Amino acid sequence: MTYSRRQNAEVVIKMMVPTEEATDNVRSNLEPTVKRMRTGAKLEVLVGNGRSYQEVVHESSVEADLIFMEIASPEESEDFTAYYEKLRASMEDMPSTVFFLAAEPMDFKEILSD
């Protein structure tokens, strides 16, 4: 990615919900925070409608330059190695992906807002 392309980058925060009915609640809870963030990010609520998380990620992020994806912590998984290997394999045909663990519960409003 060239510098000028990064300069015009768009940050999109994606949240998946199971049904269309859940979108209004997510938007009303998250949009005010996203608008106050210093990133210029946009919120996109994705509706699963019975599709797997991986399916939705593939459909909605295939054109991205870079994906940041939070993953389960090792304590939350019976076999973290198998979980991580399966996740990596499912993302092989996707753009570069950064997997991250949330270190601790944080007040993102405070960190990202003006």
Image (cartoon, rainbow, N blue to C red):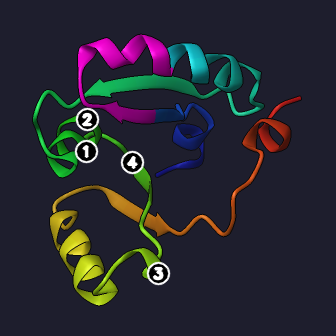
Q: Residue at x 82, y 32 (%)?
A: 113
Q: Which residue is mark 3?
A: 75
- Tell me the amino acid under the disc marked 1: Val
Q: Position of residue 104 (x, y in %)?
A: 69, 65
- Tell me the amino acid under the disc marked 4: Asp
Q: Position of residue 109 (x, y in %)?
A: 77, 35
Residue 18 sits inside the magenta stretch: yes
Give the camera-side residue of 42 and 47.
47
Sooner in the amino-acid sequence: mark 2 or mark 3: 2
| Relative vertical location of residue 52 with respect to residue 16 in this rendering, above or below | below
Q: Which mark is residue 60?
A: 2
Q: Position of residue 20 (x, y in %)?
A: 26, 15
Q: Residues within 10 Å of mark 2 (few under 14, many from 20)?
A: few
| Relative vertical location of residue 31 with respect to residue 107 in this rendering, above or below | above
User: Where are the magenta residues, as a range?
Assistant: 14-26
Sooner in the amino-acid sequence: mark 3 or mark 4: 4
| Relative vertical location of residue 15 with respect to residue 103 in this rendering, above or below | above
- Secondary structure beneath dot 4 equals loop
Q: Residues within 10 Å of mark 3 (few under 14, many from 20)?
A: few
Give the camera-side residue of 92 and 83.
83
Q: Which residue is mark 1?
A: 57
- Contact (CB < 8 A) between labels 2 and 1? yes
Sooner in the amino-acid sequence: mark 1 or mark 4: 1
Q: Is residue 23 left or right of residue 111?
A: left
Q: Is residue 8 left or right of residue 68?
A: right
Q: Which residue is mark 4?
A: 65
